[in-house]
Amino acid sequence: MSQFDCCADRRFLRKDEELLYRANACEASLRQFRAERERCKRFTYGDQWGDYIEDCGRRMTEEEYIRSQGNFPLKNNLIRRLVRNVLGVFRGKLKVPGVQTSDAGLLGEAEFINRMLKENAEANRLVELYTRGMEEFLISGLVVHKKWYGRRGNRLGTITDHISPAKFFFDTSARDIRGTDVSILGETHDMAFDELCATFAHRPSDIEELARLYGIGADNRGRCRVTEVWERRRLMRLNCHDLREGRWIKLDADRAQAVERLNSLRKSRGEAAVITDWVFDEVWTYTFLAPDSTILARGESPYPGGRHPYVFKAYPYIDGEIHSFVSDIIDQQKLTNRLISMYDWILRASAKGVLLFPEGSLPDGVDINDVADEWGRFNGVIVYRPRPGVELPQQVSSKATDIGITELLEIQMRMMEDVSGVNGALQGKLENGSMSGTLYSQQTANSMSALADLMGSYEEFMREATEVDTALINKFQTMRSERL
C-alpha cells in the first residue's frame, strides 16, 4: 500500500461511515462463498469428516460421531489427487502471455515490452504465482491478484501480490462475468503497528494520532485492521481545449471559475479563448479506512486509465454465485469415504481366527490364557488329554459378507472421474498394456476437452493480468526513464 500518498489532511479527523458500511455489506454478501471455500479447502487437504450433523439433539462433527460409536473415520483423499493432476497439466502447458503486433513499425516497441514482461515475470515469480492461483481457482473458484508499481526490498518496478479471497470483497450485485460493472471492491489488511505508521504516517505527530486511534500503548503492539476500498465514481469535469496553446486539459468543477476569468481576460485582449465542455468522468478512487471509519488516505487512482489495481476472475460467476471445481466432487468423495469405512467395519466384525476350545479338553492346572498365548505363538505346542465324546479344539474364520461394496467403490471412482473430467488418460493410466500411442494421445486430448472451459477461463485471467502489467510498464517505467 506504500504506493499511495496520504491525503492532505494528516490529522485523521474525517470519517466516511457510509463507505465503510457499503464495504462491510459487500463483505457480508460473500459470507456463504467464504464458508463454501473453507469447506472445499478442508476436503482438499484431508479434513473430510468435519461436516456437522445432529444426533439425539447434540450437534457434532461426523468424525466425533464415528469415534463415539467406537469406530475410526477412514478416508481416501481422491480430491487432492485430482487437483494435483489438473495442476500438473496446467503447469506443463503454462506460458506467461506476451504482446504481439502485426505492425512492422511497432515491432521494436513490442520486443521491448516483451523483454520487460519477461523480467517482470521472473522478478515476481509469476509461474509459481499463477500455478498457486490455479490451485486456489480449483478450490474456491475465485483468484485475485493485485498489481502496483513501487519498491519492495531493493527492487523498484511492477509488483504482483496474490490476494486471499478470504480478505477480498466486491459488489456481488454486479452481473457482468468480466467484472466491468463492479462499482466497489477492496480488501481488508491486518498489519503491524510499525507497518501502519510506515504507510500512513508522514510526521511524528501522525504516529501519536494513529496510536490513539487504534488504542496502541507501549505494551500493546497488536494487529491493526485497515479496510482498503476502491469505488467507481462519476464526477462532472470541465473539458477544455486551449486554442492558443493547442492542448487539451481536463479540470475539476471547482476550477471552472478560473477558466471563465481566463476567457474574459483573453476576450478583452482579442486572444483565442478556451473552448469548454462539461462532461462526466468515470474514475476509481481509493480510500483506506480505520475500523471506526476514520479516513487514513484517499485519492484518485494513479493507474493507467484510472483503473483499480485488482485483477480477479470468478468461475463460474452466475447471479453473484461462485461454485468451484472441487465443490462438484465433494459428494462423491464423501460417499467413497463411507464405503471404505463400511468395508472396514464389516471386516472387523467378521470372525478371524477364533479358537473353539472345549472345556473338557483343558488339562488340569492349565489356564485358558496360557492356551491362548501358546496358540498364537510360532511353533507353539498345546498339550491336552483327549476325552471320549469331547470335540477337538478348532479355529474358526469367516469371509466378510459380500454386499457389493467393492463394485460400489469402483463405480464411485469412475463417477468421480466423470464428474471432474480428470479421467485415467489424463492421469497417465493405460486401460491395457497393448494400447497404441496414437490412441492414448487421442484419449488424452479428449479428456482435456472436459477441462477446456476451466483452463480457458484462467488463461483469460492471465491475459488480463498481462495487459495491466503492460500498462504499468508503459506508464511508470517510461516516467522513471525520463527522470533518469
Image: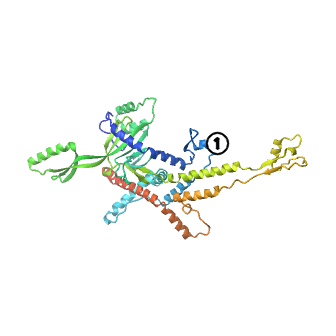
Horizontal side, residue 134 vs residue 204: left or right = right
At 61% from the left edge and 69% from the top edge, which residue is drawn?
434
User: Does residue 88 appear anywhere in the picture?
Assistant: no
Disc 1 marks a residue whose amino acid type is: Gln
Horizontal side, residue 59 vs residue 172: left or right = right
Q: Residue 329 at x, y = what percent?
A: 53, 54
- Which one is nearer the viewer's eye here, 382 or 298? 382
- Which one is nearer the viewer's eye here, 266 or 77? 77
Horizontal side, residue 18 vs residue 192: left or right = left
The colour scheme used here is rainbow
- Which one is nearer the viewer's eye here, 302 or 415? 415
The image quarter in which residue 369 lies: top right
Read off the residue under disc 1: 69
At 23% from the left edge and 46% from the top edge, which residue is drawn?
236
Q: Residue 455 at x, y = what percent?
A: 46, 58
User: Does residue 190 appear anywhere in the picture?
Assistant: yes
- Which one is nearer the viewer's eye here, 57 or 377? 57
Q: Residue 332 at x, y = what percent?
A: 55, 53
